[in-house]
Amino acid sequence: MKPLKEATAEKHKKAETMPFNIRMFQGELTEAEYLSYLYQQREIFQTIERAGLPSDALKRAEAVQADIDELEAKGNSSDAILSSTRRYADYLGTKDSQEILPHVYLNYLAIMFGGQIMKKKVPSSGKMYDFENGHEGMMAIRQVQKDEWADEVNKAYDFIIDIFSELETA
Ligand code: HEM
C-alpha cells in the first residue's frame, strides 16, 4: 500500500493550485475575500472539534474566531456559508471521534505546513496559523495516521476543492 502522502499527492496538487488558493498564497486576497474563507474554515473546524480532536493543542475554532473578529471590526462582512461548505460540514457531522481523524489530518496539517508563510500573505494577523504547541499537535496526528485513510482523505480533498471553486466565484 502506498504511503498516505503519496496516495493523496494528486489531490493535494489540485487543491494547492486552485486559483483562490494561489491568490491567497500570493497575498492578493481582499479582506472581504479572506473573511469569506475564514467563515468556511470556522464551520469546518467547529464541526470537527465537536466530534473530538486527538490533542487539545490542535484546537482552532477560537483562533479562527479571533481572525474573523479582527476583520469584522474593520467593517468587513460576508458571513455566508457556501453550499459546498454546507455539504462538507454535513458530511463531517456524521463522523464520530475515530472517523473524523482523516479529516483532522487533512485540515490541520494543511494549515500547519506552510502556515508561517501563509500568515504573512493574508490580510489579517493570521492567528489561525499560530499554534502554541504545534509540535504536540503534529505528533498527535502523526501517531494515528494510517495509509488506509487514502480514499477518505481523497474524498475530503474533493470537498475542499469544491469549496475553493465556490470561493472563487462567490
Ligand atoms: C498554497 C497552497 C499550498 C501549498 C504551497 C502547500 C504546500 C505543502 C507543503 C510544502 C507540504 C509539505 C510537504 C513535505 O515536505 O512533506 C504540504 C503538506 C501538506 N498539505 Fe499542503 N499546501 C497547500 C495547500 C494545501 C491544502 C489546500 C490542503 C488541504 C486542505 C493541504 C494539505 C496538506 C497536508 C494534509 C499535508 C501533509 C502531507 C503529509 O505529510 O502527510 N495543503 N503542503
Image (cartoon, helix red, strand yellow):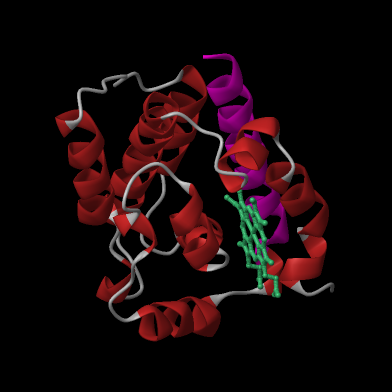
Which of 60 and 93 lies nearest the eye of the viewer? 60
Q: Where does the magenta region start and end?
A: 149-170
Ligand 1 picture quarter: bottom right
Q: Is residue 105 visible?
A: no
Q: Is residue 73 visible?
A: yes
- Residue under the point 51% across and 85% down: 143
| Quadrant placement of the N terminus | bottom right
Please state the horizontal and vertical placement of residue 107, each as a whole percent of the image: 49, 55
Please state the horizontal and vertical placement of residue 152, each as a whole percent of the image: 64, 52
**Looking at the image, how many numbered discs can be counted on the residues?**
0
Q: Quadrant of residue 56?
A: bottom left
Which of 41 and 146 lies nearest the eye of the viewer? 41
Q: Is residue 76 above or below residue 44?
A: above
Q: Is residue 109 above or below residue 27?
A: below
Q: Is residue 164 left or right of residue 143?
A: right
Q: Is residue 158 above or below residue 63?
A: above
Which of 154 and 81 lies nearest the eye of the viewer? 81
Determine if the magenta segment contains residue 163: yes
Q: Is residue 23 left or right of residue 38?
A: right
Which of 126 and 90 lies nearest the eye of the viewer? 126
- Residue under the point 56% across and 30% down: 163
Helix, strand or loop: magenta stretch: helix
Determine if the magenta segment contains residue 109: no
Please state the horizontal and vertical placement of residue 92, each as a whole percent of the image: 43, 42
- Residue under the point 70% across and 36% down: 18
